Image (cartoon, grey):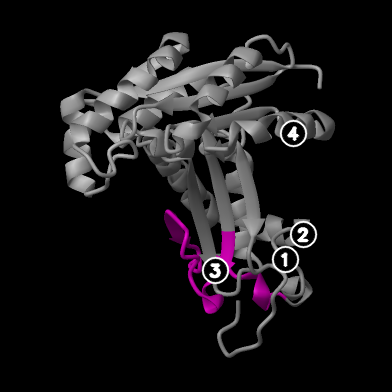
């Protein structure tokens, strides 16, 4: 690998938001590992070097297993001297009062206070993590942060131009085969002229130029396209600002063969100049004879 492996060590106080953090790094394209024993890490780095396929790793370390604590400290010291790995430590903290409130709300036991007072476990953990906290490149106090705000903080500090933190899925489908349940925006284009009734176009799809051109020639299509694109250009940034990692736009006609396929292609190609876009056609290879023609 020409460039060092990017490793983010996610650690901090129990209850401070490590679960939200690791989910955020997954959305940033990191390979995430939750609480791997330090003794297994050398073998993992060896496999990473050999594969050359992993270049971003987020590793969650906490004190659920106190027996590994000394090994964790030694591992972090060794990583700092490895030119192959560019290591950053993200330490999540919160006030004692907020941690107590979160544990009371979830009714969970603190990992270091299974049989004692909650505050004793928090104090012990804070003492044990003091060395790691001092080594951290970024300390985030989550006391007053919502999960969404913590996610935004992580994106702000770790998102790069190569990250796939936000992307757009454009999907064509046929209503006769059911609605896509994962769609955020669904548009019905069955009001447009239907190529199915043109004999030479019936067996083709919206991916074929004759069908695509037929659909796009209609004044109704052009009017719809311009208005729908104006809507998308207005609402998609809102999805991103709300912290979503993707938005799925589903375009449907009767059978998912002609009109929806052509529109999904045009819309996807246009949005690709602004966002990472994946275009897919769920039903383009399906044919189902019925009285309702597609």
Q: Which numbered mark, 3 or 4, is in the foreground of this view?
A: 4
> CA separation, marks 1 and 4?
50 Å
Do residues under tags 2 and 4 come within 8 Å of each other at their CB atoms?
A: no
Where residue 279 sits: x, y (%)? Answer: 64, 50
- Out of 74 and 220, give the one closest to the viewer: 74
Residue 205's label in the rendered image is: 1
Left or right relative to 91: residue 268:
right
Question: Which badge, 3 or 4, is on the more N-terminal residue?
Answer: 4
Query: Is label 1 or label 4 in front?
Result: 4
Residue 253: image tag:
3
Q: Would you call the spot at circle 3 few (<14 residues within 10 Å), some (14-19), or many (20 or more)?
A: many
| Region rendered in magenta | 172-198
Query: SS class of the residue under badge 1?
Result: loop
Quick check: 181 above or below 98?
below
Q: Position of residue 131 (x, y in %)?
A: 43, 13
Residue 197's image quarter? bottom right
Check disc 4 and report the residue beneath it.
43
Label 4 packing within 10 angstroms: few (<14), some (14-19), many (20+): few
Taking depth in this image into account, of 156 and 88 the one nearest to the observer is 88
Q: Are marks 1 and 2 in contact (CB under 8 Å)?
A: yes
| Residue that extends furthest to the bottom in the rendered view of this protein | 291
* Position of the C terminus by quadrant: bottom right
Q: In the rendered image, is residue 113 in sight?
A: yes
Say if the magenta span includes residue 286.
Answer: no
Q: What SS does tag 3 mark?
A: strand
3D distance between C-alphas at marks 2 and 3? 16 Å
Viewer-side residue, 197 vs 147: 147
In the foreground, 169 or 73? 73
| Residue drawn where x is 64% and y is 28% of the image | 56
| Mark 3 → mark 4, Cα distance in angstroms | 52 Å
Q: Which mark is residue 208?
A: 2
Seen at 58% across and 56% down, the residue is: 171
């Amino acid at each position: 690998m020409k460039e060092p492996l990017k490793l983010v060590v996610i650690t901090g106080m129990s209850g401070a938001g490590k679960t939200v953090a690791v989910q955020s790094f997954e959305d940033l394209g990191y390979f995430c590992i939750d609480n791997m024993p330090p003794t297994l890490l050398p073998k993992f780095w060896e496999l990473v070097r050999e594969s050359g396929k992993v270049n971003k790793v987020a590793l969650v370390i906490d004190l659920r297993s106190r027996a590994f604590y000394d090994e964790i400290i030694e591992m972090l010291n060794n990583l700092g001297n490895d030119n192959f790995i560019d290591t950053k430590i993200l330490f999540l903290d919160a006030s004692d009062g907020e941690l107590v409130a979160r544990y009371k709300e979830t009714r969970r036991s603190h990992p270091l206070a299974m049989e004692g007072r909650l505050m004793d476990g928090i104090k012990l953990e804070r003492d044990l993590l003091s060395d790691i906290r001092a080594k951290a490149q970024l300390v985030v106090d989550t006391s007053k942060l919502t999960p969404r705000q913590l996610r935004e903080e992580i994106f702000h500090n770790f998102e790069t131009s190569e990250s796939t933190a936000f992307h757009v899925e454009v999907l064509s489908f046929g209503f006769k085969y059911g609605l896509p349940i994962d769609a955020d925006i669904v548009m019905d284009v069955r009001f447009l002229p239907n190529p199915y009734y043109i004999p030479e176009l019936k067996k083709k799809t919206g991916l074929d130029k004759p069908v695509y051109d037929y659909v796009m020639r209609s004044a109704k299509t052009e009017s719809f396209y311009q208005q729908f694109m104006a809507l998308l250009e207005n609402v998609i940034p809102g999805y991103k600002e709300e912290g979503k990692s993707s938005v799925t736009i589903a375009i449907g006609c009767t059978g998912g063969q002609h009109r929806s396929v052509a529109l999904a292609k045009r819309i996807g190609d246009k949005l690709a100049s602004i966002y990472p876009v994946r275009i897919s056609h769920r039903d383009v290879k399906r044919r189902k004879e019925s009285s309702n023609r597609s």
